[in-house]
């Protein structure tokens, strides 16, 4: 439900499993029979491009059956609750439910209220957490930086509304990285002092010390008309353009969880540059979500070693 609950060993197990899956999936035979006969339900009450399709591809590559449920076009629009939706899907027999919901805590409630006996995977709950996004970000970072100890990761933008920021701060701190959040004071949550990270309001001061920089979208849809600077003012102080990117250390990478707004938090030139690993993040998401589903549904407690790989 939360990366704050993930131990270092468990996080490394997921990353190692994803690495092995990525290696196996690169073979000519991309589909693995591991979850044949199992059913994964994608239960999405909020829009998604990357996460929903990524879980669908991941489950199908493991040979699971996939049911895609979107609140739009379902009986949720007639007033049906999360509970009744969950009970309905439970009656159809799901082994795992991947849930995205606008309410923080929705995944936890679904897993603990007795409405379903399935495994529940949090695909983003309100402004709380997005654990598999943080795992795929960590996977991408480890591939590029070689490890986490002492690495400096800068996360920039609308931290207040970002479940990605919270999940990344907890996971990266657990893995040994140093995280700095950069945002206008109005876009930082109350209680940020208790998060395992540093905070800055000055992006130009932090950029030269960053091994990776992760840009976040400004989530106007969650702002309820609250105060916000103009786009021009925001981009000038907190956006990443080519000029700012040039001040990053030589091997530093540029990340974004998507969806991105080109010209706002990131310029098109930066998004399409050699330093950008944004498309790679999406590809890595499939391996990471395959690892999560594999570890949950196969009952395995270890990464896929050569002995297991032979039986896949
Ligand atoms: N990163 C992410 O969660 O993207 P989607 O909203 O498209 O799933």
Image: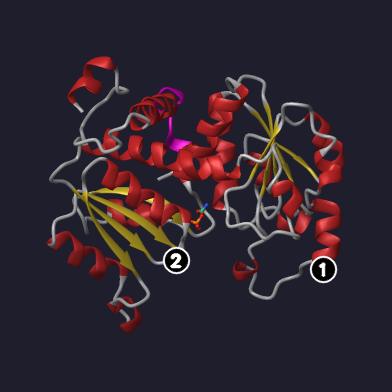
In the rendered structure, the answer to whether residue 18 lies left or right of residue 114 reads right
Ligand 1 has an atom within 8 Å of the beta carbon of the residue at disc 2: yes
Rendered residue at 47%/59% (across/down) = 49
Q: CA distance from mark 2 to mark 1?
A: 27 Å
| Residue on which disc 1 sits | 230
Colour setup of the view: secondary structure
| Residue on which disc 2 sits | 46
Magenta-tinted stretch: 4-10
Residue situated in front as seen by the camera: 75 or 67: 67
Residue situated in front as seen by the camera: 32 or 44: 32
Where disc 2 sits, the SS reads: loop
| Badge 1: residue crowd in 10 Å (few <14, some 14–19, many ≥20) | few
Residue situated in front as seen by the camera: 211 or 161: 211
User: Is residue 202 among what the camera can see?
Assistant: no
Rendered residue at 41%/26% (across/down) = 19
Q: Earlier in the sequence, mark 2 or mark 1?
A: 2
In the rendered structure, the answer to whether residue 34 lies left or right of residue 18 reads left
């Amino acid at each position: 439900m939360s990366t704050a609950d993930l131990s270092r060993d468990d996080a490394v197990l997921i990353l190692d499993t994803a690495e092995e899956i990525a290696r196996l999936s690169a073979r000519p035979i991309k589909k693995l029979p591991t979850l044949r006969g199992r059913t994964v339900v994608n239960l999405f009450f909020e829009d998604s491009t990357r996460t929903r399709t990524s879980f669908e591809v991941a489950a199908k590559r493991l040979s699971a059956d996939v049911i895609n449920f979107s609140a739009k076009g379902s009986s949720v629009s007639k007033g049906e609750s999360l509970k009744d939706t969950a009970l309905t899907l439970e009656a159809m027999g799901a082994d795992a439910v991947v849930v995205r919901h606008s309410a923080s805590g929705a995944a936890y409630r679904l897993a603990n209220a007795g409405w379903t006996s399935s495994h529940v995977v949090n695909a983003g709950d309100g402004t709380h957490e997005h654990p598999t996004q943080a795992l795929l970000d960590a996977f991408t970072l480890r591939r590029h930086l070689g490890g986490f100890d002492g690495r400096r990761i800068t996360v920039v933008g609308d931290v207040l509304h970002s479940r990605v920021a919270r999940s990344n701060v907890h996971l990266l701190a657990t893995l040994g990285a140093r995280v700095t959040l950069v945002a206008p004071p109005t876009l930082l949550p109350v209680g940020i002092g208790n998060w395992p990270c540093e905070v800055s309001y000055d992006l130009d001061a932090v950029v030269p010390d960053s091994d990776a920089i992760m840009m976040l979208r400004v989530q106007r849809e969650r702002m309820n008309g609250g105060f916000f600077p103009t786009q021009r003012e925001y981009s000038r102080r907190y956006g990443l353009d080519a000029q700012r990117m040039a001040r990053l250390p030589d091997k530093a990478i540029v990340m974004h969880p998507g969806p991105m707004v080109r010209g706002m938090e990131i310029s098109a030139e930066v998004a399409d540059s050699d330093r950008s690993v944004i498309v790679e993040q999406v590809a890595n998401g499939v391996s990471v979500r395959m690892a999560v589903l594999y570890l949950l549904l196969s009952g395995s407690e270890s990464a896929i070693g050569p002995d297991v790989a032979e039986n896949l």
